[in-house]
Amino acid sequence: MQQIMTPVKQRYLSPQAYVKDMKNNQQVDNIEQVQFIPPQIGQGGFGKFLVKYKMPILVAR
């Protein structure tokens, strides 16, 4: 079965996925802006990051 790839200009990432994405984009320099969104009281996790890209990237949906 084939994965469907969709171009996105921005996406939400967990802290682990953000670190992985930063390592991949270190040489490409495609990240325009990053905004940390803190966790809400009563919810699990450590928050998330809203990453905006200069050029759209393909993400499996």
Image (spheres, rainbow, N blue to C red):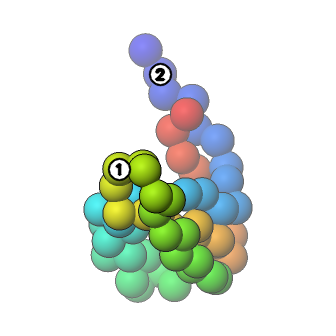
Q: State the separation of the CA atoms marked 2 and 1.
A: 33 Å
Asked whether residue 30 appears in the rendered view, the answer is no
Q: Residue at x 58, y 50 (%)?
A: 58
Q: Nearer the viewer, mark 2 or mark 1?
A: 1
Say which mark, if any, is on residue 35: none
- List the single residue furthest toward the front: 42
In the rendered view, would you say 15 is above or below 30? above
Query: Which callout, 2 or 1, points at the residue further toward the start of the chain?
Result: 2
- List the single residue furthest toward the top: 1
Say which mark, if any, is on residue 2: 2
In the rendered view, would you say 40 is above or below 2? below
Q: Residue at x 29, y 62 (%)?
A: 16
Residue at image mark 1: 44
**Looking at numbered disc 2 in the image, what kind of residue is underneath it?**
Gln
Front-most of residues 53 and 45: 45
Name the side, left or right, on which 43 lies relative to 31: left
Q: Residue 28 location, x and y as percent?
A: 48, 80
Location of the C terminus by quadrant is top right
**Looking at numbered disc 1 in the image, what kind of residue is underneath it?**
Gly
Q: Residue 17 location, x and y as percent?
A: 35, 60
Circle 1 crowding by C-alpha within 10 Å: few under 14, some 14–19, many from 20: few
Location of the N terminus by quadrant is top left
Q: Residue 46 location, x and y as percent?
A: 35, 63
Q: Residue at x 60, y 57 (%)?
A: 11
Residue 9, quarter of the rendered image: bottom right
Residue 33, quarter of the rendered image: bottom right
Mark 2 lies on a secondary structure that is: loop
Asked whether residue 19 appears in the rendered view, the answer is yes
Front-most of residues 3 and 32: 32
